Amino acid sequence: MPFNRARQENWWKRRTTLEKHLSCIALGMIFLAIILSICLIFYNQYGEPKGVCLTSSCVHAASEIMDRLNESVDPCEDFYSFACGGYIEKTRIPDDLQHINSFIEAGAKLVLQLGQF
């Protein structure tokens, strides 16, 4: 064992000053690259949220969804009432229909918009 240690020390002593400096610079660059990689990974996971739509149509769609929720119900207890309760309470079924859903409502809005042209 002492022979190996002495051999390693001799290896470092045989290096020129330039080689020693370049070795230190290379190790520093590797260390810096590792630190930057960790920072980049951390920023990508916990940085600013991506893909959040803030256009007027997205905000309007989100408000319609929120309007159809029944937030007085605990979603862990009764998810159907939580998700659909506001829609059921606020939606009136026309006399000429037996049922209604959001697709029928969207079609009716589209017909009204096309009639305005």
Image: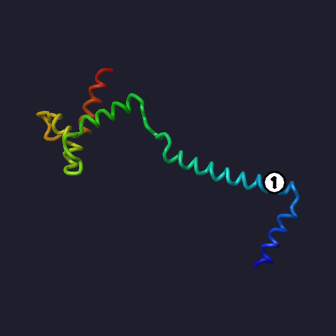
Q: Which residue is mark 1?
A: 22
Q: Please provide percent x and percent y for residue 30.
A: 70, 54
Give whichever of 25, 66 is nearer the camera. Answer: 25
Q: Is residue 70 left or right of residue 26?
A: left
Classify residue 8 by image quadrant.
Answer: bottom right
**Residue found at x 17% / y 35%:** 91
**Residue found at x 13% / y 34%:** 96
Give whichever of 61, 28 is nearer the camera. Answer: 28
Vertical placement of residue 30 versus 58, above or below: below
The quadrant of the rendering that contains the N terminus is: bottom right
Number of labels in the image equals: 1
Vertical placement of residue 117 versus 24, above or below: above
Q: Secondary structure at mark 1?
A: helix
Colour setup of the view: rainbow
**Residue found at x 15% / y 34%:** 92
Classify residue 13 by image quadrant.
Answer: bottom right
Q: Amino acid at mark 1?
A: Leu
**Residue found at x 19% / y 49%:** 78
Q: Please provide percent x and percent y for residue 98.
A: 13, 40
| Local crowd size for mark 1, using a 10 Å CA cut-off: few (<14), some (14–19), many (≥20) | few
Q: Please provide percent x and percent y for residue 112.
A: 27, 26
Vertical placement of residue 113 versus 74, above or below: above
Q: Is residue 89 left or right of residue 64?
A: left
Vertical placement of residue 6 versus 12, above or below: below
Give whichever of 107, 52 is nearer the camera. Answer: 52
Q: Quick one: which residue is furthest to the left in this view?
A: 95
Q: Quick one: which residue is furthest to the front in this view?
A: 2
The quadrant of the rendering that contains the C terminus is: top left
